[in-house]
Image: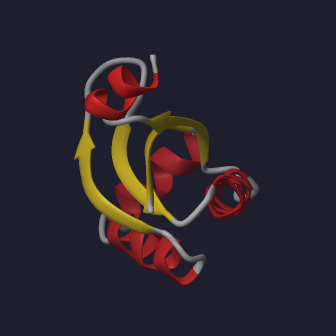
Amino acid sequence: MSTYIMLCTLTPDGVQTIKNNPARIKEVNTEVEKLGASVLSQWATLGSADFVSIVEAPDEATMARVSVELGSRGTGRYETLAAIPVDDFIASL
């Protein structure tokens, strides 16, 4: 399994959705699992991203499917970063 960092910035529609139904945040995490990935941890943040999630997926294609599905809803903009363990990174140099 590979680890990814997903940054989410809510659109105005997304802010309204969360305001009206805060439980929607965890519902989306369940939907991510149905797409073949798992949300390992998640934080609401202050700054340029509204949420930071650590996601595990079997491969890049699965993570791309998650990103496209979530982005197609129009409630958030997503940036996904591949996370490489530091020891693995050092060993590859």
**Residue in the foreground of this view, choosing between 86 and 44:** 86
Q: Is residue 49 placed above or below 83 in the rendered structure?
A: above
**Residue in the foreground of this view, choosing between 79 and 47:** 79
Q: Give the x, y percent position of residue 83.
A: 42, 36
Q: Is residue 55 placed above or below 84 in the rendered structure?
A: below
Q: Is residue 52 placed above or below 21 in the rendered structure?
A: above
Which residue is painted at 39% across and 63% down in the image? Answer: 20
Q: Is residue 48 placed above or below 20 in the rendered structure?
A: above
Q: How is the image coloured?
A: secondary structure
Which residue is painted at 76% across and 56% down in the image? Answer: 72
Q: Give the x, y percent position of residue 13.
A: 59, 48
Say which quadrant the N terminus sits in: bottom left
Number of on-image labels: 0
Which residue is painted at 42% across and 78% down in the image? Answer: 30
Which residue is painted at 61% across and 50% down in the image? Answer: 75
- Name the side, left or right, on which 68 lies relative to 5: right
**Residue in the foreground of this view, choosing between 92 and 27:** 92
**Residue in the foreground of this view, choosing between 1 and 52:** 1
Say which quadrant the C terminus sits in: top left
Q: Give the x, y percent position of residue 85.
A: 32, 36
